[in-house]
Amino acid sequence: MNPETVDRLIRFQHPEKTLGYLGKLDDERIAAVFGLDPGAYRRTRRAHDEQVRRVAADLLDRPGFAGKVDLLPFSPGQHVVALGESTTDDLLSWFEILRHLLGLRRPADGITLTNLAVSGHTSTQALTTLPGLFLHHPDWVLCMLGANDAQRLGSADGPTLVSLAETERNLHCLHDLVVRRTAARWVWLTPTTVDEARVAAYQPFQRAGLTWANRDIDAIGQILTAQPGPTLDTRPVIAREPAGRSHLDDGLHLSLAGQQALAGALVDLLADQS
């Protein structure tokens, strides 16, 4: 594989989350999955982490933003967990930016952030992760699911991977089961809109017969924005960004700029809740 492909795989694919039945996977075993030696694998991970740290530092330099991070309603010692798919599992994700924002601005608070998102997961698959989630005893759950449910198979008129009714049922189940058992505070993030032209032109999606449409994303977004409690509607956040800036070449995954926009909007939302 060429270096760009390897970098992208490491960014979005995390065997330690999906191959838990093999026991704890060290860097050597994970590196072998990507055809790398452990040193090269660790350097790639560090490079991604440094990109995220720089983005967080840039946000903190913006007038008034550091004060909003101070107002985030996470108490010292609390545990914040993320559920989601590749938008969250991404090593450059909004959640990883949030981790660095808190680490840079509020290091003494000892807030723990655990990213349980898994690239490719649907809301149905996310339900299977609940036993592991309960073991983390979260105080907060930030949940961003639905983009993979909306994947259409075969053509733009083909069936979605998960029906809208089943997506709604799964999201309600996730929320109700977690809150009932852990008393965690819950925050929704809607799936982000896609760049439909880029999705349609992306050859791997063409070969696989996969596509996404914003009408399906909007339908899930409407379900989530109707829920009680804080919900970040990511659709207008992405819409405010300059055309072509928010997505990678596949039109589905967010660029670092798109992730930065989400992180900033989430801080705005939660700071207002305090």
Image (cartoon, grey):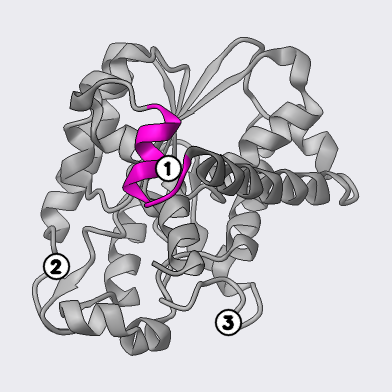
* Residue 81, above or below 221: above
- Judging depth in this view, the residue of 54 and 39 nearest the camera is 39
Q: CA distance from mark 1 to mark 2?
A: 22 Å
Contact, mark 1 vs mark 2 (Cβ under 8 Å): no
Query: Is 27 covered by the magenta stretch?
Result: yes
Checking the image for residue 188, the label placed there is: 1
Q: Which residues are magenta?
A: 26-37
Q: Position of residue 110 (x, y in %)?
A: 67, 13
* Residue kind at label 3, given as amino acid type: Gly
Position in image of residue 80 (x %, y %): 51, 24
| Residue 133 on image: x %, y % | 31, 22
Q: Nearer the viewer, mark 1 or mark 2?
A: 2
| The quadrant where residue 87 appears | bottom left
Q: Residues within 10 Å of mark 3 (few under 14, many from 20)?
A: few
Q: CA distance from mark 3 to mark 1?
A: 25 Å
Q: Nearer the viewer, mark 3 or mark 1?
A: 3
- Please give the residue where the numbered disc 2 appears in the rendered image: 160
Q: Residues within 10 Å of mark 1 (few under 14, many from 20)?
A: many
**Residues marked 3 and 1 touching at CB (< 8 Å):** no
